[in-house]
Amino acid sequence: MRLTVLGCAGSFPGPESACSAYLVEEDDFRLLIDFGSGSLTALQRYAGLHAVDAILLTHLHCDHMLDACTYVVVRRYDPSGPLPPIPVYAPAGAPDRIAAAYSQDEGPVDDVYTFYGLQPGTFPIGPFTVTVDRVNHPVETYGVRLESKGRVLTYSSDTAPCEALLRLALGADLFLCEASYLDGMDNPPDLHLTGREAAEVATKAGVGQLLLTHLVSAWGSEADTLDAASAAFTGPLEIVRPGSRYEI
Ligand SMILES: [Zn+2]
Ligand SMILES: [Zn+2]
């Protein structure tokens, strides 16, 4: 499978990146994981306006879902006529939330999206075997493990340390993990990980490669995050960029 980072800015768009959005492709099937604010621009730049066969939203914070609202226009008003609905796997509140953010007066968006409520468990999406589990974040949030052809990609979504994250990451070839907070600060509990915490999970889970994401550029320091992570994980490790591609 191939991962393309569309957006990786944590919490709000940064000067160089949209918010979270990751395109995962296998056998011409394209799964978009998260669709955060600003990432529709990146979808067009790095893939294509229609390069999405299914969407998985890990949670309903703006920086992970807001461009799913913007995307309604793309599919509903295509010059060739309305495009067929695509599946959206998301927490149960997604249909109302996306419809309300799109417009308070125009009703549901089920002509654009066919919604499937997420619950902890394993299910197929296209060629992928997908396992999701609740992670440690203030709203209903799912970490994601994708398997295909014996390869494994795990994405933390937003989370503080938790057992579910460790289970999802066990033995993953590539672990895309958030590192929002700086080590050594008085960070609020049960929200996010530091670089060191992300690396500790990666080491315990025995992952092949660690990719750090969801850094908040206005408040953080890439160098400090990388230093802290490197001290706790000795395998290949980097901070992702918009447009970065990884073959898994
Ligand atoms: Zn976030
Ligand atoms: Zn969040």
Image (cartoon, rainbow, N blue to C red):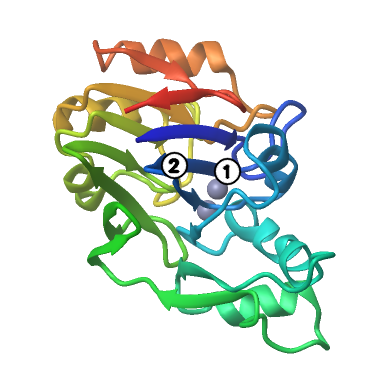
Distance in Å between CA atoms under marks 1 and 2:
13 Å
Q: Name the residue under label 1.
A: 20
Spot occupied by residue 241 in the image (x, y as percentages of width and height): 58, 23
Identity of the residue drawn at 35% across and 58% down: 126
Spot occupied by residue 185 in the image (x, y as percentages of width and height): 49, 29
Give residue 19's quadrant in the image.
Answer: top right
Spot occupied by residue 116 in the image (x, y as percentages of width and height): 42, 76
Please state which amino acid type lies under the numbered disc 1.
Answer: Ser
**Residue found farthest to the front:** 80
Identity of the residue drawn at 19% across and 24% down: 203
Please state which amino acid type lies under the numbered disc 2.
Answer: Val
Q: Residues within 10 Å of mark 2 (few under 14, many from 20)?
A: many
**Of labels 1 and 2, the one closer to you:** 2
**What mark, if any, has residue 113 been given in the picture?**
none
Q: In this view, does 117 lie to the left or right of 224?
A: left
Q: Mark 2 points at which residue?
A: 24
Q: Is residue 183 visible?
A: no
Q: In this rendered view, identify the residue nearer to me: 234 or 51.
A: 51
Q: Is residue 127 visible?
A: yes
For label 1, being within 8 Å of ligand 1 is answered yes
Count of residue discs: 2
Give above or below for 242 relative to 225.
Answer: below
Q: Is residue 43 left or right of residue 27?
A: right
| Disc 1 to disc 2: CB gap under 8 Å | no
Give above or below for 135 relative to 99.
Answer: above
Q: How crowded is mark 1: few (under 14 residues within 10 Å), some or many (20 or more)?
A: many
Q: In this rendered view, identify the residue nearer to me: 35 or 178.
A: 35
- Quadrant in which the C terminus is drawn: top left
